Image (tube, rainbow, N blue to C red):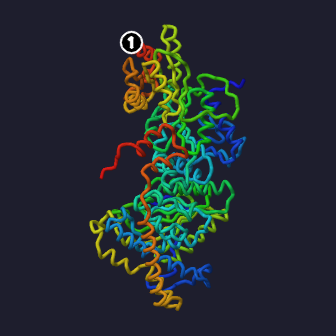
Amino acid sequence: MNELTLVEAINQALAYELAVDSTVVVFGEDVGQNGGVFRATLDLQAKFGEKRVFDTPLAENMIAGLAVGMASQGMKPVAEIQFMGFIYAAIDQIINHAARLRNRTQGRLSCPLVVRTPFGAGIHAPEHHSESTEALFVHIPGLRVVIPSSPARAYGLLLAAIRDPDPVIFLEPTRLYRLFKEAVPNSGEALPLDVSFVLREGTDVTLISWGSMMHETLMAAEELSRLGISAEVIDVATLKPLDMATILVSVEKTGRCVIIHEAARTSGVGAEIAAELAEKALTFLLAPIQRVTGFDTIVPLYKLESYYLPSKEKIIQTVKKVMEYT
Amino acid sequence: MDSPKKIVAKYEIGYTQFLDPSGKLNYPLPLSLQENPLLIEMYQAMVRTRVFDAKAILLQRTGQLGTYPSILGQEAIGVGIGAAMDEHDVFCPYYRDLGTQFWRGVKMAEILLYWGGDERGSCFANNPQDFPICVPVASQTLHAVGVATAFKLRNEARAVVTTIGDGGTSRGDFYESLNVAGVWQLPLVLVINNNQWAISVPRNKQTFTATLAEKGIAAGILGQQVDGNDVIAVFHAVQEGIQRAKQGGGPSLIEAMSYRMSDHTTADDAKRYRLASEVEAHRLEDPIARLKHYLMSGQKWNETDETNLQEKAKAEVDNAVEEYLRIEPNAPSVMFDSLYATLPRALESQRQEVLHGIKSKNE
């Protein structure tokens, strides 16, 4: 079986879709000859040519606007923003145009584009290379925000994102790019969007996470099981629109919920999930909903970044706390 | 002492005017305007546009239309662009482009519907390929770059025309668009409507350059100025730019010199920041009056034609207004219908709330 890292799975998905859909184009800064600074687009230009995979001048807002224009003409642009810390220059085009084009023309024009960008801390990167600001995009009507947390889901979700008829912000957890491998058959089979995945079934507590924090969350669940605590683990995967149905079923069963995300706490997506649970599942709850998140600080430069990132131990401690409620 | 430098590059910006403000033709008509009715059609389109514009302001003043940006005095730019484009080219407008939009089949009722607060005004039944009016200044130039890139990658002989105001040229999108269009030699024509005012900020407070056309130089793009109140000059420059684009000659930048005779929009009061005498002086440069004078002096137009045209234009606009006012408001739930190709399940309960929930509209 084909064992791939997450970044190799991204590459495999891009290559698959470039091969089967002639309207797909991949572009961004350094994605051509260089294959992207993380090598997500490695060899794609050699395989598919400069008309399908090409470098752009260095301007993120331009990359997003270019994608909007191309998408309006029936192409499927897959644009790479080199790091999430640089995506803010593109926000005008993403919010004012990509997210709105279908609605403002009542379906006459649409915007089937994907903006891929690596995000999150934990790889000892320079300043502005470690942010997790997914909530900015989750707030915007008309967008989808998708975050894979394993090589297989990266492959299946990216295929789905490219095939989706609406704009998708596809955030790739940098820390997971090469952390582990798993079997990723090049089947061309997409995973569903707008759906959260139950990665592990349990009865005592629901752990909800996404992106690179899935790694610590799954390790915490394993360790908790040795302590006799049965944790159900959900990978949200599509943060917008949010699949609350899956989360509600789980929390109604377990009665306890801990949400884990790397992003800053205030107005993070965890707050939205907690609010939804408070509105719809309060009577099922045995314990207060808890969040384990990054601090409301700027992500520190790398000597301190491990103090910023939520740890497996923090997750376990928080679960122990909610288990005190019966 | 001067350093011993040699000149490594030199640039010139040209200015073109065929028809001067008095209506005198100082150069022979371009070939494409000789021996055909196109110039008269452009005149008629400019008049129709002006009649529509006056009516739209009236509708706003009487509470029947929302905020509306007048194009008074800039009719030649829009009509010149429209007449120069082919049907299958794509237009990415800003919001003072009625002349082009009407020429390309956008219905007057659709424009009223848009400024009247209804998304259906951007459906463009007869003009499905063009972009809708673009409010975030300069951002439309990047869409034009994207459309032009699609044409180039697919080897289609089509061009893209985009417009921008003088204020928009201060924005990064404009420079980014020029840069990419230059380096990729895209089939793009970018027209600046230099109407001298960006709401209350005059052109000389936007930039220190002598012209806006020279902004193309940094991107390796041919820039030129034309008299934007001379529809012949606008038409000719845009037509040349489109031909160049389709022949693989790359992009062009046209600065059309004009003047915003109106307030920025109906929500603005230009008396707060500019003198009436300045506006009056520009009235002598009117694009419609000069063309009318030229056509009449050549016996191509007479007062009977003019009366007929005015009546026809008024009837057309009145019909459009009637059509607009007859259109029932959209059902509130349509705000969900075109948000995504298929409404995500997560949004269904909110849609149901609009359909069946407690009435949320404040009366």
Residue at (58%, 50%) from the top-left corner?
Answer: A71
| B224 relative to A324, above or below | below
| A275 relative to B151, above or below | above
| B340 relative to B268, above or below | above
Quadrant for the N terminus of chain A, please. Answer: top right
| Residue A95 image offset from top left, x and y in percent | 46, 46
Question: Label 1, on which residue?
Answer: A326
Q: Nearer the viewer, residue B44 or B297?
A: B44
Crowding near pointer 1: few (<14 within 10 Å), some, many (20+)? few
* Residue B4 visible (yes or no): no
Q: How many marks?
A: 1
Host chain of mark 1: A
Q: Nearer the viewer, residue A177 or B311?
A: B311
Q: Circle 1 sits in a helix, a strand or a loop, which is it?
A: loop
- Of all residues, the one furthest to the left in this rendering is B272
- Of all residues, the one furthest to the top in this rendering is A227
Quadrant for the C terminus of chain A, please. Answer: top left
| B257 relative to A117, above or below | below
Q: Nearer the viewer, residue B108 or B195?
A: B108
Residue at (64%, 31%) from the top-left corner?
Answer: A9
| Residue B50 image offset from top left, x and y in percent | 43, 75
* Residue A62 visible (yes or no): yes
Residue at (52%, 33%) from the top-left corner?
Answer: A238
| Residue B188 image offset from top left, x and y in percent | 58, 61
| Residue B98 image offset from top left, x and y in percent | 47, 68
Q: Amino acid at mark 1?
A: Thr
